[in-house]
Structures are given as C-alpha cells and as structure tokens.
Amino acid sequence: MWVFDLLFPARNSGEQAAQIREIFENLQNQIPILYSTAIIALSGICIATGEADLKVALPAIPLIAILVWRALHWTFLKRPAENLETIRKEILKVIAFTILLSGGFSIWAQALMATYPDQALNVVAFSVAAALGATYGLSSFPRAAIIPLVLLGIPAALRLIIFSDYLTRATGVGLLLVHLMFVRMLNAHATTLVGLIRGRIAVVLEHDRAISAEDEAIKRSEADILTGLANRAKLIDDIQRHIAKDQRGKSVIAICDLDGFKRANDVFGHAAGDALLRGFGQRLAQDFGAKATVARMGGDEFAIFWRRGLSSSELSAAGDRICQLAREPVEWSGKRLTVETSCGFAEEGPLSASVEELLRQADTALYIAKAAGRGQWKFYDEEAYSIDKRRAKLEVMLLSGEAIGELSLDFQPIFDVAGGKVMFVEALARWKNQQLGSISPGEFIFMAETLGKIEAINEALLDNALAHARSWKDNVRLSFNLSAAQISREGAADRILARLLQHGVPPDRMLFEVNDSAVLADIRIAKRELEHLRSTGAFVALDDFGAGNASVAYLRDLVFDVVKIDGSLTRDIQACARSRQILLGLINLCHAAGALCVAEHIETEEQLTLVKAMGCDLVQGFHLARPLNGDGLDMLERRAAAPGR
C-alpha cells in the first residue's frame, strides 16, 4: 500500500515489516500520552472559554469522551498483535485519529480565537500544548508525529503573527520557529530510526546466518559428503545416545560392504565407484531411512541402525532386501554396473552393551557372511560367538607376535609339463596351535593384513623358506607369495633382496608370486618394486589369474614371467567343452604376453593330459605332489627324476 511505502520507506518488504512491528511495539506504550494530552488541552480550552460562552465549549464534550475511550482502550484493553495485517490496521487507525483530532482541534481553536480575541493566547497555549504533547506521544513514529505540528501547532502560531501588537506577533514567530525546528528534528529522528532498525535487522540476519552456518557445519560433520547419508561419527553418536536411554537391548545394527566394488572401481575408475556408492546408499536410505539411521562407514562399507529393533521375520526380510538392493544394476555413463553385498547383523544385548562391542559383533557376522560366499547375510548368534572367540584369540596371538613362533612351511612342487621336472617349489604357510588346532592361511593371512602384522609374518616365513632353499639344487627355484602390504611399500624390493643376500640365495633362484590384491593396493609402487626384483634375475608371477579382480590390463601394463591360472578354471575341463575353450584361450593369452603358464589344482591324470595338449607350460596339484613338510624335501630329487612327468 502506498501509504505504508510513504510512512515506512524500506529497501524490501521484510525490512518494512520489521519497521512496522518495531514502531507499533513502541507506540503501544506512548499512544495513551497522545490521547491524554488532547483531553487536557480540550478541557483547558473549555474552562478558558466556558466563562464567556458555555455553548462554545459544549462541542468538545463528545470529543473528550471519544478521547477517553481511546486512551482506556490502549491503556487497559489493547493486547499485543502478532499478525502483521492487524498491526497495519491499528497503525492506520492511529494516523486517521491523529489527522481528525489535529485537524478538528485546529479548526475549533481558530474559530475560538476569532470569536474571543481576548482569549487567543489561552487558546494558542492549549493548542501548542496539545500539538507538542501529541508529537511526544507519537515520537516513536516520527512521520506521524509531524501531523499535530503541521495541522495544529503551526496554524496556531501563524494566527498569532497576524495580530496587530508586536509582542503577540513575536510570540507567534517564536512558536513557528519552535514548531519548524521540531519538524526538522522529527525528520532526522525518522532517518536515524530507520538506520537503527536496518542495523538491528542486519545484526539479526548475521546472527541467523551464523546459526545457519553452525547448523550446516554440524550437518556436514555428521553427513557423508559423497552419499549424503550419516557418517560413522553420527552413527556412533546415535547408538551411544540410544544405549544410554534404553537398557532393554533390542536395537539392531547391520554392517555391509560391496563385493566386487574394488574391481569396478579399478576397471572403470573412481567416478564409476562413486556412482555405485551413491546408488546403493540412496536405495538403503529409501528403503530403511524412515525407521533407521543409514550411514556410510567409509570406503564401500555401510551400516543401518534400527533403534527399536527388528523381529526375526523383519530381520530376515531386511537381510534379503539389502542383498537384493546391491544386485540391482547402477546406470553410469551408458553402462550397467553390478556388484553384490555381504552383510552382518548384530542385536544389542547383555554381551553387546557398548557401541564398540555391538559394531564388532556385526563385523564378525559380516566376516562369516563373506566366508560363506558373496551376496549373503549372517546374524551374530552362538556359532558366530564361537568364531568370535577364536578370532579374538588369533588376534591376540598375531598382535603379541606369539603366532610367528608357531608358523611353519609346507612345500608344493611345480612341474614342467614336458619333462616332468621340478621347476619351482612353492612355500605354503601353515599354523598349528595346541588349543585352536590347524589354522588355515585363508583365516589368518587376511586377519594379519587387517592388524598390520602381515609384513612381520611374511618376513619370518621368507627367512624360513630361504633357510630350506639353500640346500636345493641350483635348477630348483623357491616360489614365495608376497603380500599387498609387503610389495606396495617404497623400498620393498631392497628389503627382500637384503634377506636373500643374508641367506646366500641368489635372486635368480626365486619366483615371487603376487595376486591381484597386491597389485591393486598401489599399482604404481607395486610395478616399480616388481620391476626392480626382475632386474636382479628373479621371476615374478601373477597368482590366481581368472578368479579375483585381476584384468587382462595387468598383463599389458605389468611384466610377469609366470601366470598361474586359478584352479577353479581347471576343475571341470574334462567334462565341459566350454571350460576347455576358456582355459585354452587363457593359456594362449599368457603366451602372447610372454609369460609361462601354470595350471593349478591338477588332481587327475585326465586333467594333466588335457592341459599338456593345450600347451600349458607348468602344472601344480595333488595328482603330481601334495605339499611336503621340511622333512620330506628329499623327495624332490626323486620327483624331478621320475619319468613320464
């Protein structure tokens, strides 16, 4: 409305609304002064002129009654208004009453001065008092406070100027100057008031901005940047607060990671990996976010926390659904990316009363799910508890170094297909414990890598293997597996070569095997360290080709002297023509890359005949020789000399 734009000049509607509210709040305490001043002035004029003619004062009585009512209304009955439109209406009423009262009062006063010249000074005095009193009552609203001065005070002063005597004229001029000074002062006050309100608004906005920034910072600190899900810190905080409040122990957590994520990330790049993480995270949030905290723990690991727990049927359905969500392809750059997930569930209870224990139990269930096969989920139960106790014992032994003293080696030969001679002897780690029995490499190697103890273990095993290899014939090479942590560190080759020198075994009698995880750990460093080993005469082999994440690109980008084809590709070649075709293609691929080819897990004479016909260079498996302990190494010579191999 144009009236408000004139009375409340502002840069925007929000600023104008703030001015209106601010002024109205102050007016509520001052407006009664406006009406009280008018009542006193009117009463004074009535008394001053009533002695001459009572009829002249009678019209002021109804006006005084209205003023009394308005004064009481604002003093006792008026309540704070929250609605902006209501405030606008009240302000318009104040302006309208001010104009009517000031204008009416001015006309009446002028009429009285014309009728009773001898009472003119009294009338002017009360008029000026009324004008100044009304101005003070409206001082918090400067542009409205000018109205009584302009309509009532200034006309009264001008009336005195037209009188004949100089004293009266001088009084009128003085009053006029006072009123003009008040008008100027009110204009300056209005400008200052607008500036103060703008400053206050700026402070409020800055405060709100600071609060918003703080809230945003808190959200960012609790959210995963890539997926928008809760992060690990937020998840742990939710679990801690819930455990502190609820002692009934019914909450459930699921921890899952993406099987095959590393392969997709390596083949297609980080952008594809990010798309997989976002896609899976969004699906989890859509399906479970309404009733649970969905978080990304880091890497390709996610967690879901149900505060109110799950029934057995709900838990089973949730596990199946999580696995299903991971299998659904993610569209990225015209490609359909597919992965699976393994998932572990744990329920809060007497044995998991802390965040750390609850997460650890879920991790154990995840470990069991992975061991059982990809794309499955497991719940932490009594069986898992037994496995957990075993893992805890293994961890203690690995961390303390006790495990190293119990490790031993078996040796399995690798034979030349054409002549049947032993070309390499692979060192296989073995661990037997009096309480836990036989512990497979698949069980403790991964755990040692996780705990950061694999290098110490591998170095001890290498020392053991080299001690045996010193007594072998020069034409038999020791084949030793290097871990990802071992070969992906700067200077790894120099440390290995130093050990060879210490044991008196030349590098050209060594074959170092690495699998895809070792290369994937840091392909740049791994490539440089492997090339350094090859430059000294050592052979390098790619292990388990065709079973893990290794792609054909490795044969192009890295130089391998030997490629060991995983046993899963030789298992059914005697019964499946397609398997034979695939194996033949891989053998030819190895030869095209300039590498010798080893067929692993040869367990029958028929398998041996087939791989020999396909042109495979080397073979390894139970049909030719089972792993031998240190005491059985003398059988190597007889194996090497055996005919028909």
Image (spheres, rainbow, N blue to C red):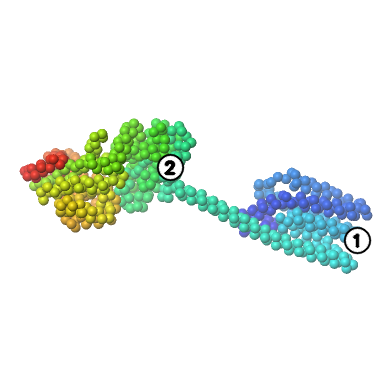
The local crowd at label 1, few if under 14, some if 14 to 19, many if 20 or more residues have their Cα within 10 Å, is few
* Mark pair 2, 1: CA separation: 90 Å
Q: Is residue 317 visible?
A: no
**Seen in the image, is 410 located left or right of residue 259?**
left
Q: Are marks 2 and 1 in contact (CB under 8 Å)?
A: no
The disc labelled 1 sits on which kind of residue?
Pro
The disc labelled 2 sits on which kind of residue?
Ile
Q: Name the residue at 45% across, 40% down.
A: 240
**Seen in the image, is 551 located left or right of residue 235?**
left
**Seen in the image, is 237 located left or right of residue 373?**
right
**Seen in the image, is 367 located left or right of residue 168?**
left
- Asked where in the image residue 392 lies, by quadrant, the reply is top left
| Number of numbered discs on residues | 2
Q: How far across and how far down the image is residue 200, in percent?
A: 62, 55
Q: How far across and how far down the image is residue 587, in percent?
A: 17, 49
The local crowd at label 2, few if under 14, some if 14 to 19, many if 20 or more residues have their Cα within 10 Å, is some
Q: Give the camera-side residue of 97 and 401.
A: 401
Disc nearer the start of the sequence (2/1) = 1
Q: In which quadrant is the C terminus drawn? A: top left
Residue 146 vertical position relative to residue 323 in the rendered view, above or below: below
Q: Which residue is mark 2?
A: 236
Q: Name the residue at 17% across, 48% down.
A: 466
- Tell me the SS state at disc 2: helix
Label at residue 117: 1
Q: Is residue 298 visible?
A: yes
Q: Give the camera-side residue of 189 and 229.
A: 189
Q: In which quadrant is the N terminus drawn? A: bottom right
Q: How far across and how far down the image is residue 203, in percent?
A: 59, 55
Residue 475 vertical position relative to residue 372 in the rendered view, above or below: below
- Tell me the SS state at disc 1: helix
Q: Name the residue at 19% across, 40% down.
A: 571
